[in-house]
Amino acid sequence: MLDTLQVVTTVVVGLMVGVEFSVAFIMERILDALPGDSGQLGHAHGGRMLGTLMPFWYIGSLVLIAIWAVAGWQNHGAGLVVTAAGLLILSVVMSILLLVPINNRNKTWTPENRPADWKEQLERWNRYHYIRVAVIVAAFTLLVAALA
């Protein structure tokens, strides 16, 4: 049972990391290359869509890691799992304090109502997001190492 939990948790977290990595390094460039207001509208739509999905994915991943840490406390790699949980908690705190406020504004913007500094706000969100991606990649790496 523990083996199944470990694999499911690693896959769920790995997929989450893949989505966030794609947002940072692929989708951002695609949206920024679109003509006219299409990129800004795409950012707003992405903010609404992923802003709804990702909190469940992050919290679900954290719950799975916590269960793994408790169930496998006596096993090799438990410290790595606990550290991965700590990093995921850090990413959630970063999200709530730094990224969500910007996203909550961004997802309501249209070409008619966006603020003059909308590009700067999105650039700030991207910088915070790059840091969050690094944190969750580190957490994922620790989970993979704990499997060994």
Image (spheres, helix red, strand yellow):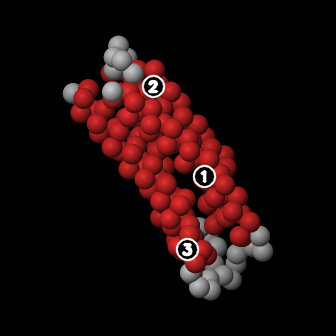
Q: Which residue is mark 1?
A: 130
x%, y% of residue 46? Answer: 51, 67
2 versus 95 height, above or below: above
**How many residues crowd mark 2 within 10 Å: few (<14), some (14–19), many (20+)?**
some
Q: Quadrant of residue 19?
A: bottom left
Give whichever of discs 1 and 2 has the lower sequence position: 2
Q: Which residue is mark 2?
A: 80
- Residue 112 is left or right of residue 75, and the answer is right
Q: Secondary structure at mark 3?
A: helix
Q: Quadrant of residue 6?
A: top left
Residue projecting furthest to the left: 1
Q: Amino acid at mark 2?
A: Leu
131 versus 76 height, above or below: below
**Cα separation between marks 2 and 3:** 36 Å
- Residue 10 is left or right of residue 1, and the answer is right
Q: Amino acid at mark 1?
A: Tyr
Question: What label sits on residue 31 in the rendered view?
Answer: 3
Residue at 62% from the left image edge and 44% from the top image edge = 94
